[in-house]
Image (cartoon, rainbow, N blue to C red):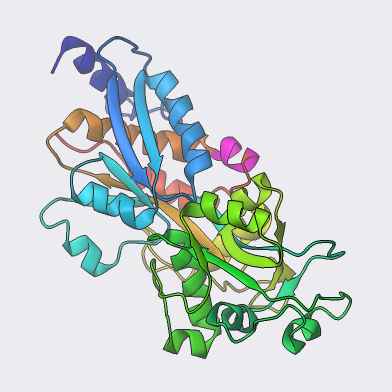
């Protein structure tokens, strides 16, 4: 390792408390021609906030972190193939997926709470659409095919819905957003549970496929009488209308940051896993909770051939947990519940040499 990289690692170690405790992670400033370059890939869901975080952290630490928004499944495959240093996913790794990493030790850490917004394009609709889980499932199952279907009318009695065919837009790639949606539909709809079920790459019964949250948002924006699901930030950035979804308590809720954080808080006491919090938070109890919410995880190796990259990524995790809240809120994401954030800060430290 060069002298510059050695200096960077020393600064990072001290910033993480190995050279003395500190109230929050400090990051050294070491910029040179020998700057560490780190590659990551995965979920499109957190791409806006990760882009900002990686830029800020990189400027402070003198490193470059490049993140490609290619979908949760593709990101995990890239990490398995050693073509990236870390991955990101909106669906926690299950036992089978972790087994594929073999003896390579990895950790997944949630860094933000997001929501899957049910977005639609109905010209001149005067009020927000209201939907419940079973009705949404039947739209994606192809059982409800027109906007003036009796079930949609009953949920929206104060709106004149058009007699137009519903144009469903789905994800065409392996997607954590799809997992969030299908996890929710599996909980609410027996027909969905018995059919496509919970999956990052479901067999959609109907719909036009698009790649990434970006692609789905773009298709909805230009397709009249369409409906689809994208991460809430993409709905906001593309000025798409988001439906009010009936939650577990019967309240109609949109994916605002307060409703997303309420969902995570409501599920916190029932989580058995307090190391990685690798569990679903959809259909959470409480009147304030948005029902199609999820944590989003970073997957970071703890051992490997490049210890510098591993140490930098561990420092980034601590930096994001300690200092990323304002950026997350500004972009429409909800920060982690405080108790979860404090637990993770205690759990994450620089890996041993």
User: Who is closer to the viewer here, 173 or 67?
Assistant: 173
Residue 274 in percent (x, y) is at 38, 60
Most common SS among magenta residues: helix
Q: Percent position (x, y) of residue 120?
A: 69, 63
- Quadrant location of the C terminus in the rendered image: top left
Q: In the image, 95: left or right of 58? A: left
Q: Quadrant of residue 248?
A: bottom right
Q: Residue at x 52, y 66 (%)?
A: 208
Q: Quadrant of the N terminus?
A: top left
40 w.r.t. 102: above or below: above
Name the quadrant containing residue 19: top left
| Location of residue 239 in the rendering, given as x and y in whole percent from the top left corner | 71, 49
Which region shows up in magenta? 325-330
Q: Residue at x 40, y 59 (%)?
A: 173
Q: Please, is residue 220 above or below residue 23 in the view?
A: below
Viewer-proximal residue among 184 and 288:
184
The reply to whether the magenta stretch includes residue 82 is no
- Number of callouts: 0
């Amino acid at each position: 390792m060069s002298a510059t990289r050695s200096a960077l690692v020393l600064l990072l170690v001290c910033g993480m408390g190995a050279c003395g405790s500190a109230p929050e992670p400090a990051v050294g400033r070491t910029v040179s021609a020998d700057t560490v370059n780190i590659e990551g890939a995965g979920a499109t869901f957190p791409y806006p906030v990760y882009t900002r975080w990686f830029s800020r952290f990189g400027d402070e630490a003198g490193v470059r972190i490049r993140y490609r928004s290619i979908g949760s499944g593709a990101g995990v495959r890239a990490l398995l193939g050693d073509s990236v240093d870390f991955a990101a996913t909106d669906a926690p790794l299950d036992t089978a997926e972790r087994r594929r990493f073999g003896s390579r030790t990895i950790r997944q850490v949630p860094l933000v709470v997001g929501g899957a917004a049910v977005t639609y394009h109905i010209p001149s609709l005067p009020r927000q659409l209201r939907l419940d889980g079973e009705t949404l499932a039947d739209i994606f199952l192809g059982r409800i095919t027109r906007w003036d279907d009796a079930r949609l009318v009953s949920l929206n009695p104060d709106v004149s819905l058009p007699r137009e065919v519903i144009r469903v837009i789905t994800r065409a790639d392996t997607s954590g957003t799809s997992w969030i949606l299908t996890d929710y539909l599996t909980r609410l709809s027996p027909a969905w549970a018995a059919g496509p079920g919970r999956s990052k790459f479901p067999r959609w019964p109907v719909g036009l496929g698009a790649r990434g949250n970006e692609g789905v948002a773009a298709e909805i924006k230009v397709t009249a009488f369409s409906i689809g699901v994208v991460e809430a930030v993409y709905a906001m950035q593309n000025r798409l209308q988001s439906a009010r979804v009936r939650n577990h308590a019967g309240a109609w809720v949109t994916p605002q940051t307060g409703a997303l954080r309420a969902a995570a808080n409501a599920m916190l006491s029932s989580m058995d896993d307090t190391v990685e919090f690798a569990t679903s938070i959809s259909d959470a109890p409480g009147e304030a909770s948005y029902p199609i919410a999820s944590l989003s995880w970073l997957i970071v190796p703890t051992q490997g051939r490049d210890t510098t990259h591993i140490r930098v990524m561990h420092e980034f995790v601590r930096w994001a947990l300690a200092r990323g809240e304002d950026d997350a809120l500004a972009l429409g994401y909800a920060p982690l519940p405080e108790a979860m954030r404090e637990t993770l800060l205690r759990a994450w430290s620089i890996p041993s040499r």
